Image (cartoon, rainbow, N blue to C red):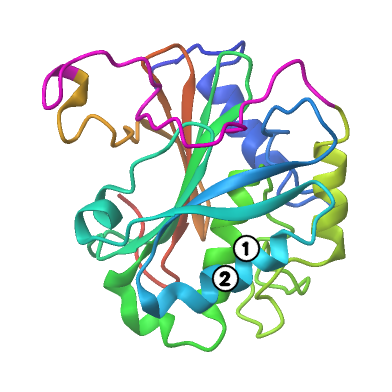
Amino acid sequence: MKILKAIGFTVFTLGTLVFSSATLAYHDWNNYHWARTTGSFTLKVVDSTTADWDLELGSSLSAWSQSSVFDLVIDTYDDSRKARKRCQSVTGQMRVCNADYGFNGWLGLASIYLDINGHITKGTAKMNDSYASYWAIEGEKNHVMCQEIGHVFGLGHTSEDGTSQQTCMDYSNSINSQFPNDHDYEELADIYVHTDSYNSYDDSGSGSGGGDGGGCNAPPGKGCNKSNADVPPMGTRVHRGKRHEIWVAPGRDGGLWIHHVTLVPGEDHDH
């Protein structure tokens, strides 16, 4: 495996750390978090979901906003097919999308971008409508959406053995595992207990836009502003579990893309 050196660690080490917390009582995702200079903050959300996901998105955002760390506010809307398929990351914000992404083996995909200091600067949460039959299972739309959004904050799993901790951050099919629980809120408070010297979230009056790593000055449709330039690379798979995978890819400005893939249960994922 090619070793990708970024922000002080290697892909191999990162993959180990990402997975190591999954079976512990603490379920931070390698202590990834958004930088902020205040005790709490408002994280803007770009809504790129269709009407049949509105209830799940609203419920998840409302549930996570009960945390003492942040409030989640929908800042802009774009549910066009193009926007949902591309699910372009927006610097300082989180984007949530659903689309027919194909029968590629995954139900949900959470992506975060870390700057050179290791702080989250943007993230996306994608739900794959190609597996519409799975979404017919009671509670699973809430479960997967809530979990992918939770990863964008820096949370890992509470368990991966199929047991229920009555949280969307487990891998249970229990009807009681649709939303965060008190332990999730406590974990977020621990992750965000300290403040930072700058804000990596969008604290301005309007979104700052941006694609992979930002800093693109090319004309529209040229160079890094080509139509696929804002689609982050998947990079190298550093971990594969029974129900999830972790992929890592370098960004253009020295940062790092990290992808958490929620796999479709029961499929052969040996690829």
Q: Position of residue 256 (x, y in %)?
A: 48, 23
Q: Nearer the viewer, residue 187 or 221?
A: 221
181 relative to 184, above or below: below
Determine the CA span between mark 2 and mark 1. Answer: 5 Å
Residue on which the image places disc 1: 61
Which mark is drawn over residue 26? none
Left or right of residue 219, residue 132 in this image: right
Residue on which the image places disc 2: 58
What is the magenta segment's predominant secondary structure? loop
Point out the image quarter for the N terminus: top left
Dot 2 and dot 1 residues touching (CB under 8 Å) = yes
Residue 227, quarter of the rendered image = top left
Q: Nearer the viewer, residue 255 or 208?
A: 208
Kindly state the secondary structure of the residue where label 2 is placed.
Answer: helix
Q: Is residue 213 magenta?
A: yes
136 relative to 81, above or below: below
What segment is highlighted magenta in the picture?
A: 195-223
